[in-house]
Image: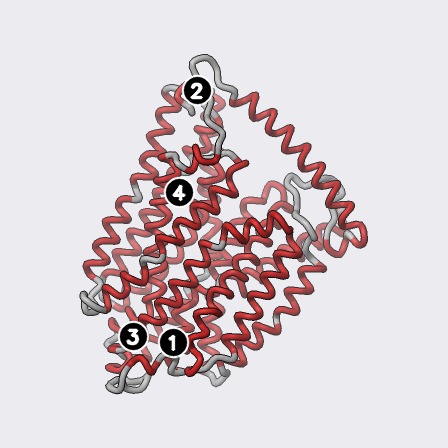
Amino acid sequence: MAGQGLPLHVATLLTGLLECLGFAGVLFGWPSLVFVFKNEDYFKELCGQDAGPIGNATGQADCKAQDERFSLIFTLGSFMNNFMTFPTGYIFDRFKTTVARLIAIFFYTTATLIIAFTSAGSAVLLFLAMPMLTIGGILFLITNLQIGNLFGQHRSTIITLYNGAFDSSSAVFLIIKLLYEKGISLRASFIFLSVCSTWHVARTFLLMPRGHIPYPLPPNYSYGLCSGNGTMKEEKKTTKHENRELQSKEVLSAKEETPGKGQKQEPCSFWSYALSRRFAWHLVWLSVIQLWHYLFIGTLNSLLTNMAGGDMARVSTYTNAFAFTQFGVLCAPWNGLLMDRLKQKYQKEARKTGSSTLAVALCSTVPSLALTSLLCLGFALCASVPVLPLQYLTFILQVISRSFLYGSNAAFLTIAFPSEHFGKLFGLVMALSAVVSLLQFPIFTLIKGPLQNDPFYVNVMFMLAILLTFVHPFLVHRECRTWKETPSAIA
């Protein structure tokens, strides 16, 4: 196992990172692709006869209907990115890795082929292609996250890296834009992405398990190339092993957390947690910050066009700069390291004071939640100032804030709620936040219409809403202090 398993584990890790980095989250590179679509005259017929050519500053800036159409496509794609987390997670749980990945490959390949063969006359097909691209990408991410189970104590770091790679894949659309400017057609680029599906299929059968990778990893676990014909037998053994481990863990945790006299037994139903104040404020925190991120990405091309006075060369430069900063894989581990260090610190204090392990773990999430809100506030402030050079700082704050957002979300749900409800609560919070994200299109329409391209009042509204998100870490902190002062208050 040591001689053969380690290289296979490393190969699985590296190819998984490449898959997430190169394919999974490309939707967030949307501004780069919009630039190309506009050059190809997609939805140009909506601009009216008074709109000039794409290089004409007035024609580009004044084409409200075209910008609205692109914003609507991104709104639909970003909605599916979150809303489909729940059903795709169910597919992965129910039908396991191979089936989930084959579905992902089907959606992704179909989407890239549709985009490859669309033109200005059939641009409406983007409404079908972008959601399909998103669903395929989400399934790629979900099936790769389990690879962290192969690396024991480094599991959280690996999972964080994959989330960062997912964010960083937005750079793919930047590469397509740069190639387009060098004379490589949009069709050629997307046909290449379609051909890469053969690599996804090969990886599915050679480097991934048929079922799930268990945690903790049982002795002599094998998968992919190493499992041969014994895959199903091996996975049945590992499933039994995993069940025994989980049962023993539940018994131990029950002994540790059994309430004493005067303590209340926490209700165990899913809805008791889904309807709790803790979950409600977490939903507000995630929804507000995520809506601002989506609105910024979906309207960036229009925003830069207005700030640059329609100078398309400057718009191209800043669009490239935005895409270059989207390497969340470099930012993602910071949040995980912060939480791990704080958790170790609080655990040492808990051993001295006899505090609850649950209180200690929850306290470690407070700085991460607060820092995410603070980063987003700084990002919103910079984006609200109509000075082009300042947008470089905006782009940096945006990618760091987004990396912290999704890492903090997953970590908080893991710590603050029982593990048996994690999947359902994670799917629920992502689905509900997806519904909130649909507001980005009416907000964009408001800016383009009644506000006459002036987003000042919308930005002020969002900054006030972001200030509201600080309530969430404050309430969690207050809850932690209550637990430390009166341990019997833990519910």
Query: Cα distance, mark 4 to mark 2?
Result: 29 Å
Write down the quadrant of residue 106 in the picture: bottom right
Quadrant for the C terminus, please. top left
The circle on residue 342 is none
- Mark 3 falls on what kind of element? helix
Scheme of image coloration: secondary structure
- Measured Cα–Cα span from mark 2 to mark 3: 58 Å
Residue shown at the point (32%, 75%) measured from the top left: 66
Residue highlighted by disc 2: 264
| Residue at numbered disc 3 | 65
Residue 109, by quadrant, is bottom right
- Compare marks 1 and 2 and give the one earlier in the sequence: 1
Amino acid bearing label 3: Ala
**Closer to us: mark 3 or mark 1?**
3
Q: Estimate the spatial distance between the alpha carbons at disc 4 and disc 3, rounded to whole Å.
A: 40 Å
Q: CA distance from mark 1 to mark 4?
A: 35 Å
Of labels 1 and 4, the one closer to you: 1
Q: Secondary structure at mark 2?
A: loop
Please report whichever mark, 4 or 2, sits nearer to the chain's N-terminal start: 2
Q: Earlier in the sequence, mark 4 or mark 3?
A: 3
- Percent coordinates x, y for residue 243 in the rendering: 67, 35
Residue where numbered disc 4 is placed: 368
Going by the numbered disc 1, the residue's amino acid type is Phe
Residue 468 or residue 433, whichever sits in front: 433
Q: Nearer the viewer, residue 361 or 41?
A: 41
Q: Residue type at mark 4?
A: Ser
Is any atom of residue 316 visible in this view? yes
Residue identifier under label 1:
35
